Image (spheres, helix red, strand yellow):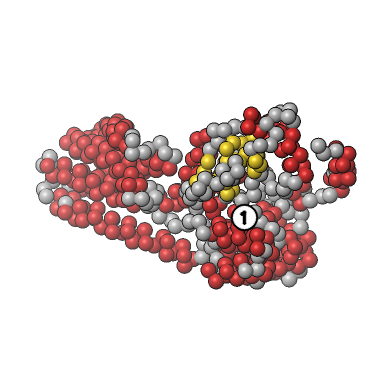
Amino acid sequence: MVDPAALDDETITLDALEDEVRPDDRVDDERHDEENRLKPEYVRDVRAALEAGDKGAVYDLVEPLHPADIADLIELVNTDDRETFAAAITDLMSPEVVAELNDHVRELMMEALTPEDVATITEQLETDDAVQLLEDLDEDDQKAIIAELEPETQAAVESALSYPEETAGRLMNRHTMAVPEHMTVGDLIDYLRIEGDLTHDFFEVFVVDSSHHPVGTCALNWILTTPRSVKLTDVMKRDQTLIPVTMDQEEVALMFQKYALISAAVVDDSGRLVGQMTVDDIVHIISEEAGEDALLLSGAGDGDINEPIREAYSSRVRWLVANLGTAVVASAIIAFFGAAIEELVALAVLMPIVASIGGNAGTQTMAVAVRAIATNQLTRANTWRIVWRELRVAVLNGATIAVLIGIAAALLFSPEMGAVIALAMIINIAVAGLAGVLVPVAFERLDQDPALASSVFVTMITDSMGFFAFLGLAVAAGLAPL
């Protein structure tokens, strides 16, 4: 057992804590607004000091900030001033700041530093943060930086980079608290006090067998409330959730959500414990995936305001070109019924309404379908049930809108026109409901992201069908010639 008296020299008193003032502890309302954002006037002061070349003033302004706020400030200063800003704050440019930076900004900052400087920062980061720092750099820059790392860090980083992007192997923390199953609770407590590496956060202790396969977990509250003589095998939780090292990050996030996990063991192909995922990692993943899906639906690429203009142009323009092609299809249908439109102006007045309402209906259904696929609520097992459900919802919506627009068109033009647009509206909204489900499902079946610009194709279907149904029904009803 450990003598509590032996810990006296290392006990931190409240007085010592009061004397040690860290940026993390400071509450500074002068620099933040009510939503905890840096105030515009404060940012202007920093910019003015930079433009004046007063590095001392810049340092004094920035020094009280939390690392996350410093990262925000770097992104808020002008692009051309960022390198000068980093040089002005010197030691404040900590690994914690670098880890909080936007990907594009961080990449530019790393390119401005020497491999030795980047290696120094990397050494102080958790493995997952270190990998995130290096993975977007050029291969030659990666090798130069990795060569400067300590052997242990070098091996961990190279191992992580060997896994595909956005998998558990890339994102996991390799620092785990793992102990053999023959220990008692007392043995574990003594081990944690004397030999355990407590500089890294952990929420549970993993119990492993002689082959380093996880066989159970012990939550910290169990350890602290269980008699010392009790064996770990008698109190550990055996039905733990194990994450394969190659599992996609989105699937990892779904597992944490489904099973309400705080942390989970990551295992390699042979079932050996190689790391852990914790809930703080999952928060980042959920935020990243949600933003990514929203941007893919619109074809906006990364959608990052720090993304270089050339890359933003390249990622967006290809979908605009695709959208141009789909718009031509709708225009061709309008041209086919050109004589009817010339003969009856009411068709030109009303047909945008049919297409617009159909497009909105399709977007609603598509958003529901993409979310359902992303959260595993829509799978191969229930696809057709969901399609049938969304079709019934669409028909009900179509009938409601059809009654409203039909009455309006009958009063403004003629009863026949009211009937035509009402029927066209029902048809188009029903088609929109089908397209809103089937397009994302088709992407998923093709092993593509269901959010991948589905809106472009759904809009094409609803516009084309809306024009065709309305104009075709008008011609069929004898309201206008073909």
How far from the left and from the top, in percent, is residue 25? 77, 47
Left or right of 182? Residue 410 is left
Note whether 55 is above or below 332 in the view shown.
below
Left or right of 14? Residue 26 is left
Residue at 28% across, 46% down: 462
* Quarter where residue 434 is shown: top left
Residue annotated with mark 1: 127
Label total for image = 1
How far from the left and from the top, in percent, is residue 206? 62, 40
Residue at 75% across, 63% down: 91
Query: Of residues 261 and 196, which is closer to you in this image?
Result: 196
How far from the left and from the top, in percent, is residue 202? 66, 43
For the question of whether residue 427 can be seen, the reply is yes
Residue at 67% across, 60% down: 123
Note whether 205 is above or below 107 in the view shown.
above
Left or right of 43? Residue 338 is left
Note whether 357 is above or below 74 in the view shown.
above
* Quarter where residue 113 is shown: bottom right
Residue at 11% across, 48% down: 481
How far from the left and from the top, in percent, is residue 421? 22, 39
For label 1, the SS is: helix
Query: Of residues 281 and 403, which is closer to you in this image?
Result: 281
Identified by mark 1, the residue type is: Thr
For the question of whether residue 414 can be seen, the reply is no
* Quarter where residue 157 is shown: bottom right
Left or right of 144? Residue 410 is left
